[in-house]
Image: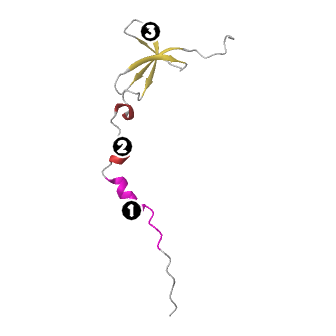
Amino acid sequence: MKTGIHPNYREVCFTDLSNGFKFVTRSCVNTKEMVKMEDGRELPLYKLDTSSESHPFYTGTQKSVDNMGGRVERFRNRFGKTPAKAATPEVAA
């Protein structure tokens, strides 16, 4: 490998700000802060708004579109395509 052209790939601690969940993985992300881990290591810290521990899709709290109190059915009834009316020949009077 050439020296000086590759990003700094190292272990980084990611912290979920909504619930305090932390996980360590390898990344090239730029960080300004450091955090002291429980095992004594000092790692770069990257703060996240959501992670798999707090995102509704992963926690199972996301509402399904089909379970929205009949809103989808009301929309389909209101704006759904109606069958085309059969063409009736006009009678000349």
- Amino acid on which disc 1 is placed: Arg
In magenta segment, residue 15: no
Tag 2, which secondary structure? loop
On the rendered structure, is 65 left or right of 43?
Answer: left
Query: In the image, which is nearer the foreground, mark 2 or mark 3?
Result: 2
Q: Residue at x 39, y 19 (%)?
A: 22
Query: In the image, which is nearer the foreground, mark 3 or mark 1?
Result: 1
From the image, tell me which residue sits under label 1.
78
Q: Earlier in the sequence, mark 3 or mark 1?
A: 3
What span is in magenta?
70-85
Which disc number belongs to residue 64? 2
Nearest the eye: 14 or 79: 79
Q: Earlier in the sequence, mark 2 or mark 1?
A: 2
Categorize mark 3 by other alpha carbons within 10 Å: few (<14), some (14-19), many (20+).
some
Say if mark 3 contacts mark 1, CB within 8 Å. Answer: no
Q: Residue at x 35, y 38 (%)?
A: 62
Nearest the eye: 88 or 36: 88
Nearest the eye: 71 or 45: 71
Which quadrant would residue 78 be assigned to in this image? bottom left
